[in-house]
Image (spheres, rainbow, N blue to C red):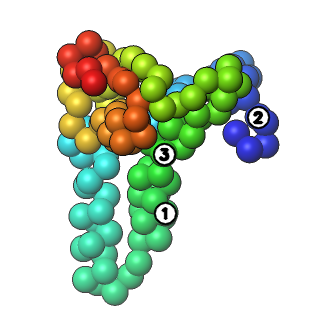
Amino acid sequence: DRMGIDIWEVIEAASTKPFGFTPFYPGPGPGGHCIPVDPFYLSWKAREYGFNTRFIELAGEVNISMPSYVVNKIIEGLNEKEKSLKGSRILLLGMAYKKNVDDKRESPGLAIFKILKKLGVGACLHYQFCF
C-alpha cells in the first residue's frame, strides 16, 4: 500500500502462471476458532522448551493491527470525498471470517465495527446491529 502497488494487479499477474497458482486475497485479518488463536498455543509450548517462535508473534502483531489499518483506509476514502468519519453511516457486510460461511468467531470485522462505533460512526452489521 505504501509503495503504491495495486495488490489486485499483483494477484492478476500471478494468476498468469501456467501451473500451481492458488490466489490468496487480502482481508482485514484472520478469523474463526483456530487461526487467530491456535498458533499462540504452539508459541507458548515452544517457550517451555526454550525457543522463541518469532514468526508466530510477528504474524500475530500484524493480524491484530489489521482492523485499525482498515479503519484508516476508510478514513482516507472519506477524506478523498471531503466527508467526515464521525457522523457517517457505514454498512458492514461480510462479517464472517470466511466467504460463504456464517461463523463470526474472532472475525476482524467485529473489531472494525467496534472501532468505528467508538469513533462516532453510524454502522450496521448485516442490517442486524445498527447504531
Whether residue 55 sits left or right of residue 4 in the image: it is left
**Viewer-proximal residue among 123 and 54:** 123
Compute the Cα span from label 1 to label 2.
23 Å
Looking at the image, is mark 3 or mark 1 nearer the viewer?
3
Q: Amino acid at mark 3?
A: Ser
Task: State the residue position of label 2.
Answer: 5
Q: Amino acid at mark 2?
A: Ile
Q: Which mark is residue 58?
A: 1
Residue 47, how many percent across, how many down? 31, 80
Crowding at mark 2 (Cα within 10 Å: few <14, some 14-19, many 20+):
few
In the picture shown, does residue 38 fall above or below 32? below
- Upstream in sequence: badge 1 or badge 2: 2
In the picture shown, does residue 39 fall above or below 92? below
Task: State the residue position of label 3.
Answer: 68
Q: For numbered disc 1, what is the local secondary structure?
A: helix
- Upstream in sequence: badge 3 or badge 1: 1
**Viewer-proximal residue among 43 and 60:** 60
- Upstream in sequence: badge 2 or badge 3: 2
Whether residue 75 sits left or right of residue 81 in the image: it is left
Q: Are marks 1 and 2 in contact (CB under 8 Å)?
A: no
Q: Is residue 99 visible?
A: no
Crowding at mark 3 (Cα within 10 Å: few <14, some 14-19, many 20+):
some
Residue 19, how many percent across, how many down? 63, 23
Tell me the residue at 42%/71% (across/down). Answer: 53
| Residue 93 sits in quarter | top left
Looking at the image, is mark 2 or mark 3 nearer the viewer?
3
Compute the Cα span from label 3 to label 1.
16 Å
